Image (spheres, grey):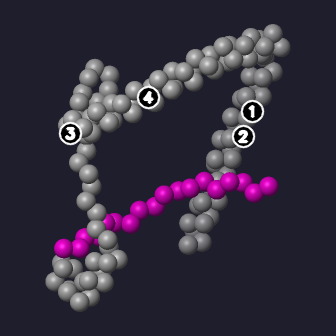
Amino acid sequence: MIEIAKKLDSLAALYAERDGLAAQKQKLIDQVLTPEVRKRLEEIDAEFAGKDEGAAANIEKLEGEIKQETLAFGESVKASGFHAVWTKGRVSWDGKALSTYGQAHPEILQFRKEGEPSVTLRRLQAKD
C-alpha cells in the first residue's frame, strides 16, 4: 500500500508540473496580447456567445427528438454524420436479495458470475 501511495504522490506531482507548464504558456501568451487585441477578442467572444447558446439549444432539442423517435422505432438508425444506436434495456437483478435467497437455495449460486475488480484514478482537489 505504501508503494502505491508513493506512486500516487508522484502522479500528483506530474499533474502539478503539467499544470505549471500550462500556466507559464498562458502567461507568455498574455504578454504578447496588446490591449487592442484583448478588446477585440472580448468583442468576438461576446458576439458568438449568444450564437453558441442558440446552437446548443437547437442541438439539445433535436437530439432529444431523435432519441425519443429512435426509442419508439425500436431499431438503430444510421445517417451520413450520426448513428442513433438503439440498445435493448439491460436486465438487472437484486444481488443482495439473490444472495440471501442463495443461502436457502444454494443451487442458484452456480449461475452467479462475478467480474474482475477494476481501479479508477480520481484527482483530488487541492486543499486551501
Q: How busy is the neighbourhood of tag 4: few (under 14 within 10 Å), some, or many (20 plus)?
A: few
Q: Find the distance from the CA under tag 1 to the CA under tag 3.
A: 52 Å
In screen coordinates, is 2 left or right of 81?
right
Residue position for label 4:
61
- What mark, if any, has residue 20 been given in the picture? 2
Query: Of the residues shown, which amino acid type is indicated by label 1?
Result: Gln
The residue shown at (69%, 47%) is 16
CB within 8 Å, label 1 to label 4: no
Residue position for label 1:
24
The location of residue 50, given as percent across then percent down, is 62, 19
Specify the segment rendered in magenta.
Answer: 111-128
Q: Find the distance from the CA under tag 3 to the CA under tag 2.
A: 50 Å
- What mark, if any, has residue 74 been given in the picture? 3
Looking at the rendered structure, the secondary structure element under dot 1 is helix
Q: Find the distance from the CA under tag 4 to the CA under tag 2.
A: 39 Å
The location of residue 95, given as percent across then percent down, is 32, 73
CB within 8 Å, label 1 to label 2: yes
Q: Nearer the viewer, mark 4 or mark 2?
A: 4
The residue shown at (60%, 66%) is 5
Looking at the figure, which quarter contains the N terminus? Answer: bottom right
Query: Of the residues shown, which amino acid type is indicated by label 3?
Result: Gly
Query: Of the residues under marks 3 and 2, which one precedes in the sequence?
Result: 2
Decide: is 119 above or below 19.
Answer: below
Residue 67 located within the stretch drawn in magenta? no
Task: Please name the predominant secondary structure of the magenta segment in the image.
Answer: loop
